[in-house]
Image (tube, rainbow, N blue to C red):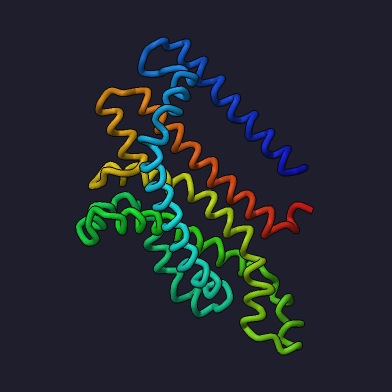
Amino acid sequence: MIEQRRGVWYLYGILIFFTLWYMAASLVNLPIIPTPWIVMKNLLGIFIPKILIHGSYSLWRIVAGVILAVIVGVPVGLCMGYFPKWDRALSPIVYLTYPIPKIALLPIMMLLLGLGEVSKILMIFLIIVFQVIIAVRDGVKSIPKETYYPLYSLGATFGDIFREILIPASMPKFLTSIRVAMATAISVLFFTETFGTEYGMGYFIMDAWMRVNYLEMYSGIVVLSCMGLVLFGVIDYLDRKICHWQYK
């Protein structure tokens, strides 16, 4: 029932978005802003022959970057939150490198790693991993020390504490960090896909713009927005399943 209500609210949001888009197109009345109905008709016609391959490449890059950030960021954040020495040693490094604009590193990444998949995935990784580390660390630090004492007295190992306490306690902040970083990651991916590639939604949208094909350009923008909607929906679903105690 809850999932159905949430789906209805998603539909309401989409309807409001398309209504505002239609009003803007009617007000401007120029080819540069076509009506949503024309764009959707065009999208249905070109999705499989043109857009599907580009969307698949973009989705793969985002998912690969997120998975890599989770593999690296979660263990580091857990260790920083649980072991004070790890926190003292690594916090200055994280604080020093986190504020660096990641997009400024793109030329360096391309020179070192080439113009292929690795540099683009690594950019997504760099955007997300710092937020994951800090969120997981803060989630573990927020656990009262008294929580561990009964487990210590019962002979619990670090693996038991890791599995029963640290992971569940850090999950809400971890998922929030992924949610916050996702929009930035998609925006940066769009930028990186305009260099050295022939596949990706960034390339498709910019190519359509250069050809003054506004219908294809807007079709690509709609697909990129839908990808973001799906990814956020997946994160919300995982949040409700993993952190179910927050919704009782």
Image location (x, y in percent) of residue 219? 41, 29
Could you tell me which residue is drawn at 58 percent across and 64 percent down? 138
Q: Nearer the viewer, residue 235 or 92?
A: 235
Relative to 174, residue 190 above or below: above
Say if 144 sits above or below 178 in the image.
below
Residue positioned 58% across, 76% down in the render: 82
Quarter of image, res 111 = bottom left
Q: Is the N terminus in the top left, top right, bottom left or bottom right quadrant?
A: top right
| Residue found 28% across the figure and 41% down from its top | 194
Q: Is residue 226 left or right of residue 193?
A: right
Query: Is 83 positioned to the left or the right of 112 in the image?
Result: right
Residue that appears at 75% across and 58% down: 245
The reply, left or right, for residue 201 in relation to residue 19 is left
Q: Residue 137: give x, y in percent of width and height.
A: 55, 67
What is the total number of numbered labels drawn onto the structure image?
Answer: 0
Q: Is residue 245 left or right of residue 132?
A: right
In the displayed image of the protein, which residue is found farthest to the right?
248
Residue 159 in the image, given as x and y percentages of width and height: 62, 81
> How far from the left and from the top, in percent, is residue 68?
44, 63
In the depicted view, which residue is nearer to us: 231 or 165?
A: 231
